[in-house]
Image (cartoon, rainbow, N blue to C red):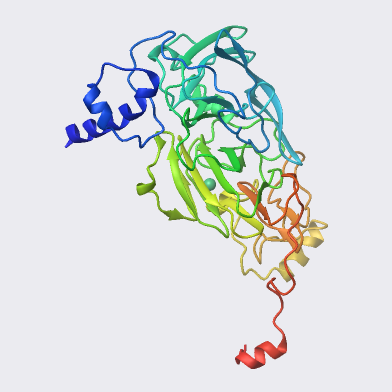
Amino acid sequence: MNDDINRARREMLLGGAVLAGATALLSEKAAGAAPATTHTWERSYSGEPGQRALPPGEPGRDYTPVITPNGSALPWKVIDGVKVFHLVAGEVEHEFAPGLTAKCWGYNGAVHGPTLEAVEGDRVRIYVSNKLPAPTSVHWHGVYVPNGMDGVAGLTQRAIQPGETFKYEFTFRQSGTLMYHPHHDEMTQMALGMMGMIVVHPRRPPAGYQVERDFAILLSEWRIRPGTARPDPNEMIDFNVFTLNAKAFPGTSPLIAKTGDRVRIRFGNLSAMDHHPIHMHGHFFKVTGTDGGSIPPSAQWPESTVLVPAGTTRDIELVTDSPGDWPVHCHMTHHAMNQMGHGIPNMIGVKSGAWDKNIGSLVPGYMTMGQEGMGSTGEMRMAVPRNSIPMVGGQGPYGYITMGGMFTVLKVRDHLVSYDDPGNYQAPAGSVAELAHDADLKRDGIRW
Ligand SMILES: [Cu+2]
């Protein structure tokens, strides 16, 4: 059984390996018969440095750059045919949403780090400078690297000490959605924000690879006690800030597309402890790839929610077919809110009138909260500890949006002159849910 799988896998992989030059793994006969059903062009690895790199891929010619909402791409330059990148680890004052900032750790002055983008076959040299007060390392999650480039402090390299710059160098021998993060004091450094996305485009894109909109979104979670200045890396369960590219709604940028656009969203999840089922309204999509590579079309099926487990990536693809403002959010309801006051008593249904009056005589201004739920808490802008956003959502065209956290909006429009934020959706008259008229109730026999 395993032999069959391994043989099938080798044949599949070799189909792409022809591009890279021959490998000694399989005979030419097998190579000729192998179907090219995968983005992976070269999987066998026989040493570094310098082998099998292809000319550096260029944006516009070899790929359409991805969009990192609320983020940026890591700049590079080509030196002697090698793409050279530079990551600088350091402390960053980061705003999660208006009202909440914290001292985090990130790269190049950003939380999370910029997206590293390349093309299959690119040779890359990545310098990592450490401006942190602690040692660190960078692991290239999902990337086929020589063992010594794997970035696991203690196991495959010594840790990068404060003030040092290390050099990583390898050739991308695959395409897909990958990630980077420290593999030294992971609990602390990732809880403080040190992570980023890697997008490697296929050298020979298969049919359907090109899309109009290609987004990269990294999911993470934090414990920031209201009023404190730093995320708490010791938290194991009770996270209270949930982010898309380190932003909580209403700090998240919307995703803009035209009706009929082909859209890819690459989700990565480097949360400490949680999986995130990301749900999209108004559309279906297919899951087309993971951090292990692309998924053949025959193995894809339609979904409206994709579970992104901790430590994985999931690519989804769709065609936008319906204009509007469509939520994209984690379906764990506590992940679509901000700094909920966990541990408070359940007050649903409590009649607190006399109680409020009595306590009010002792504590001026006292008011019991939560008898009808929490929906109004953010809108009321209750007095909260400085530097905190408990329950805060955002203003929508019809009222207050009571979600926060892992929530953003896919804005689809029939006509766009640019992909700048087009503002709120103007729904056609008569197409919005509204108060039922008496005539409707009478006609349909609705009584209550
Ligand atoms: Cu979630």
Q: Nearer the viewer, residue 203 or 277?
A: 203
Q: Position of residue 298 (x, y in %)?
A: 35, 48
Q: Position of residue 184 (x, y in %)?
A: 49, 19
Q: Quadrant of residue 80?
A: top right
Above or below — where is 236 with respect to 403?
above
Q: Quadrant of residue 351?
A: bottom right
- The quadrant of the picture occupied by the C terminus is bottom right
Left or right, 262 with reference to 399: left
At 62% from the left edge and 69% from the top edge, which residue is drawn?
Answer: 349
- The quadrant of the picture occupied by the N terminus is top left
Left or right, 158 with reference to 161: left
At 60% from the left edge and 54% from the top edge, which residue is drawn?
Answer: 260
Q: Nearer the viewer, residue 375 or 330?
A: 330
At 73% from the left edge and 70% from the top edge, which residue is drawn?
Answer: 353
Left or right, 144 with reference to 386: left
Q: Position of residue 263 (x, y in %)?
A: 57, 46
Q: Nearer the viewer, residue 35 or 132?
A: 35
Q: How many numbered marks does the figure carry?
A: 0
Q: Nearer the viewer, residue 206 or 366?
A: 206
Residue 181 in view in this figure:
yes
Q: Position of residue 101 (x, y in %)?
A: 72, 34
Residue 274 in view in this figure:
no
